[in-house]
Image (spheres, rainbow, N blue to C red):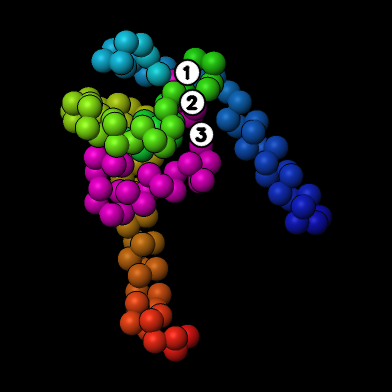
Amino acid sequence: MSAKDRLAALEADFKEKISGDLIEIPFPESGSSIFVRGKCSAFKKQPVLQAAASNQFDKFNALMIVQFALEESGKSVFNNGHVDALIKKMDSVVLERVANEIAAANKFSDDTLEDTYMEVDEAEKNSPSQSTLDSGSI
């Protein structure tokens, strides 16, 4: 099986997994509920996990909402331009509550975040230092 065929099969498998029912999360502070899928791509998780690994918890919470909050139709509620607005305009307790509910629905867990921290630490240990990069020795 070629790489192209494998990628097509993986894409079909993922589309089937995310095509299921949406999970409703009450969000009365916004005037209505939001919805999330029980699965998501690594592409959508990446910026969220980077914020967590950088100990940017308000950004982590805002990104959870921006990346995963959907309308009932399945369309995204927010875009990346809304991250700072959510941090500035939302009660931090509400921001954290909604982000935690999204995380639970998307199968994020402390184990997932702990794995991310370990991966970031390992990558930093194995990457060349900035001075090495600046000197052009690699």
Pick the front one: 10 or 131: 131
Report the side of 7 relative to 111 (left or right).
right
Q: Which residue is mark 1?
A: 71
What is the span of residues highlighted in magenta in the rendered image?
Answer: 35-61
Q: Which residue is mark 2?
A: 76
Q: Which residue is mark 3?
A: 39
Distance from Cα at disc 3 to Cα at disc 2: 15 Å
- Residue drawn at the location 41% of the way across and 47% of the way down: 47
Say which of marks 3 and 2 sits in front: 2
- Residue drawn at the location 24% of the way across and 43% of the way down: 57
> Disc 2 residue type?
Ser
Query: Residue 108's image quarter?
Result: top left
Disc count in the image? Answer: 3
* Farthest residue, direction right: 1
Give the mark nearest the N terminus, 2 or 1. 1
Q: Is residue 50 magenta?
A: yes
Q: Is residue 10 visible?
A: yes
- Residue drawn at the location 28% of the way across and 30% of the way down: 86
> Disc 1 residue type?
Glu
Report the side of 128 relative to 43 (left or right).
left
What is the x, y in percent for residue 34? 40, 18
Q: Residues within 10 Å of mark 1 (few under 14, many from 20)?
A: some
Query: Residue 60's image quarter?
Result: top left
